[in-house]
Amino acid sequence: METLQKMISDLTVDAQNDAKGSAGDKHETALAMMHIEQEKLNQKLKEVIDQKTILSKIDGSQTHNTIALGSLVEANKTLFFVSAALPKITIDNHDVFALSPQSPLGLKLMGNKINFQFEINSTKYTINAVK
């Protein structure tokens, strides 16, 4: 979050400095490109804040009998963490795939228990553990 906020701030300063010493079509194009980049960074910052909000709602000490937000699910030796869509995480040589409860896979998992079976991309899975 801090990195994105700094990048947005730097672009604002650059745009202000550019406005002081430039004129013409090149100036307008440069300002427009900086504005587009700022919009992209603001959108990314919003996504990061949303992910942080979701993660802050998870109680790591809680165990689950049914799959819910914060569940660690083992299915066919694959670990899924129902939280927010994040890049693959490796912990103790185990790959963990963090997924949103609103994702297609998250929707299939939510509310289910051990021994639930489902299929994704022609692969059949059975839930072996929920933590």
Image (cartoon, rainbow, N blue to C red):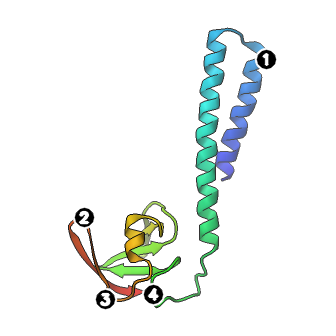
Q: Residue at 37% x, 73% y: name it.
A: 108
Of the two numbered discs 2 and 1 on the same chain, state the one appearing first in sequence. 1
Going by the numbered disc 4, the residue's amino acid type is Thr
Assess whether mark 3 and mark 1 are in contact (beta carbons under 8 angstroms).
Answer: no
How far is the residue under mark 1 from the one under mark 4?
60 Å
Asked whether residue 72 is in view, the answer is yes
Return the x and y of residue 99 as percentages of the image width and height: 45, 67
Numbered circle sitting on residue 115:
3
Of the two numbered discs 1 and 4 on the same chain, state the one appearing first in sequence. 1
Numbered circle sitting on residue 9:
none
Assess whether mark 2 and mark 4 are in contact (beta carbons under 8 angstroms).
Answer: no
Numbered circle sitting on residue 20:
1
Asked whether residue 95 is in view, the answer is no
How far is the residue under mark 2 from the one under mark 1?
55 Å
Of residues 40 and 66, the one nearer the viewer is: 66
Of the two numbered discs 4 and 2 on the same chain, state the one appearing first in sequence. 4
Q: Which residue is mark 4?
A: 66
How far is the residue under mark 2 from the one under mark 3?
19 Å
Circle 2 Cα neighbour tier, 10 Å, few/some/many (<14 / 14–19 / ≥20): few
Going by the numbered disc 1, the residue's amino acid type is Lys
Going by the numbered disc 3, the residue's amino acid type is Asn
Please, what secondary structure does the residue beneath circle 1 have? helix
Numbered circle sitting on residue 121:
2
Of the two numbered discs 1 and 3 on the same chain, state the one appearing first in sequence. 1
Please, what secondary structure does the residue beneath circle 3 have? loop
Toward which corner of the image does residue 16 lie, by quadrant?
Answer: top right
- Position of 87 relative to 96 (above/below): above
